[in-house]
Image (spheres, helix red, strand yellow):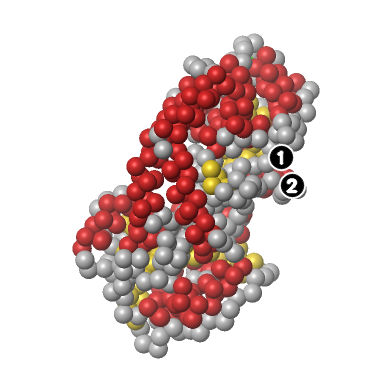
Amino acid sequence: APAFAESHLPIVDKPLELTIHMHWPRAQGYGPGGDTNTLYPVEEVARERTNVHLIDKTSGRNTKDNYEAMNLLLATGDLPDIVGGNRIQQPVNQYGPEGAFLPLNDLVNEHAPNIKKFWDEHPGLKEAISAYDGNYYYIPYLPDGKYGRAWFIRQDWLDKLGLEQPDNVEELHDVMVAFRDQDPNGNGLKDEVPYFARDWEEVLRPLTLWDARTSGSDTYHDFYVTPAGAIAHPYAQEAYRDAMANLAQWYEEGLIDAEVFTRGSSSRDYLLGENLGGLTHDWFASTSGYNAALAEKIPGFNFIPFLPPKSAGGVRMEEHRRIPIKPDGWAITYTNEHPVETIKYFDYFFSEEGALLSNFGVEGKTWNMIDGEPVFTDEVLNSGTPVNSQMYLEGAQIYRGYPQDYRYEWQWTAEAARKGIELYDTEDLLVDQFLGVAFNQDEQAVYDKYWPSIQTYMLERQQAWILGSGDIKADWESYIATLEKMGYSKVIDVMNSAYTRQYG
Ligand code: CA
């Protein structure tokens, strides 16, 4: 079991009320589903244990738009003690150095042993959330678990055609050709779609099979850290040129869903449900659910994770992974007259007791400790409602700053996904992520001036090359020259100056 620093409870002898803005997709307001007249069960226990009482003071409760809510909050000029919710990193890093939020570095070092311990055990994360002045201004929600997406294949189609799982990019090509030509769904029609993607951006993922990158993080089209330790963009690299030429060839051969850019988010439901899709790259947990869902409709249906095929350069890599820090969490405003008590309260959710409370809800109500492990009750696991949705109403798994515990999710992950995760664990597949930079005002201005139109141009060209209008190798020099004219190097310069300042 992980060791936790000692906590001193209660934090205050007499109840202390702190006001909070808590605005996130599941609740606009600090209460179950945004009902601020009802206390979360987790809040009730946190009050008993800490003597700190959080009182709702959320702005923008009638909008789900967090930017709008944040603007309303900042416009009031009457800030609550705590500002929490989703995507607070950018506003606190912008307004923190200007004085609206308190820097947390010293408060954590002096009063938050559990948070400090987390930073010590996870080097680089504190730097990643820091603003341009070197201070950090919020305590993030910290996801746990390694894997997000995986490669999936119709194992029953492989079996039917007498084929092995593809181990490298050439074998993957041959399997896709067989799926296209040999009627594995057995209807006499050449209607199979070898590779499909629910999110069109996943059409890019095969680029990694020729040693290019599609993104440096769990955000599509993101910058990435080169092996030399600098920031670059994947779509301006020669590896991208060569990989894209191969991907366009696959598209031309009919190995990739011809409607990948237009079919939309229901494509996975449709192409699996109609017994048409052969391969995809999608989330472990949700994609594994189709075996149970389609067992009756499609006898033998078996869509399972397989290891990423080795690239042309011999590298087996899974580019997608869970990000270790989110822009969500909570911060202390300059109006807060109890910063020490507040940081101690934040620290409580990083203690063993508080981390269990913020992940699993109230012990004895939604979970019990069995052989040293927190285990959800049968009622929670078998209610028919996803466990995360239940937790949101308990006040657990909400976007306060806390360390997520993957044991929370593993308990309701389907067997096929569990096996897939164990398979992925047999190799060292993941690469380091680009965790973002905090610009100073000059850098931000350069980025805002040039980057949006550059990315639009990159994506327009990308789609054209995949669809076969234009030849990337023939177009490459003029493409790079156009990027340059649009300010690519200027953006890369500010990315790198910010990156060097932040990560050293
Ligand atoms: Ca067929």
Instruction: Name the quadrant of the N terminus.
Output: bottom right
For label 1, the residue is: 316
**In the picture shown, does residue 327 fall above or below 274?**
below
Q: Residue at x 61, y 20 (%)?
A: 250
Q: In this view, does 24 lie to the left or right of 350?
A: left
For numbered disc 1, what is the local secondary structure?
A: loop
The location of residue 325, given as percent across then percent down, is 51, 57
**In the picture shown, does residue 305 fall above or below 257?**
below
User: From where the camera sits, is residue 207 visible?
Assistant: no
Quarter of the view holding residue 351: bottom right
Q: In this view, does 112 lie to the left or right of 244?
A: left
Check mark 2 vs ligand 1: CB closer than 8 Å? yes or no: no
| Mark 1 Cα shell of 10 Å, populated few (<14), some (14-19), many (≥20) | many
> What type is the residue that disc 1 sits on?
Arg
Q: Which residue lies furthest to the left in this view?
A: 76
Q: Is residue 261 left or right of residue 313?
A: left
Q: Residue at x 35, y 80 (%)?
A: 338
Instruction: Name the quadrant of the C terminus.
Output: bottom right
Q: Residue at x 59, y 70 (%)?
A: 120
For label 2, the residue is: 427
Q: Which residue is drawn at 50% across and 60% down?
A: 502
Please give the label number shown on residue 238. Answer: none
- Depth check: 140 or 356 in front? 140
> What type is the residue that disc 2 sits on?
Glu
The location of residue 290, given as percent across then percent down, is 59, 36
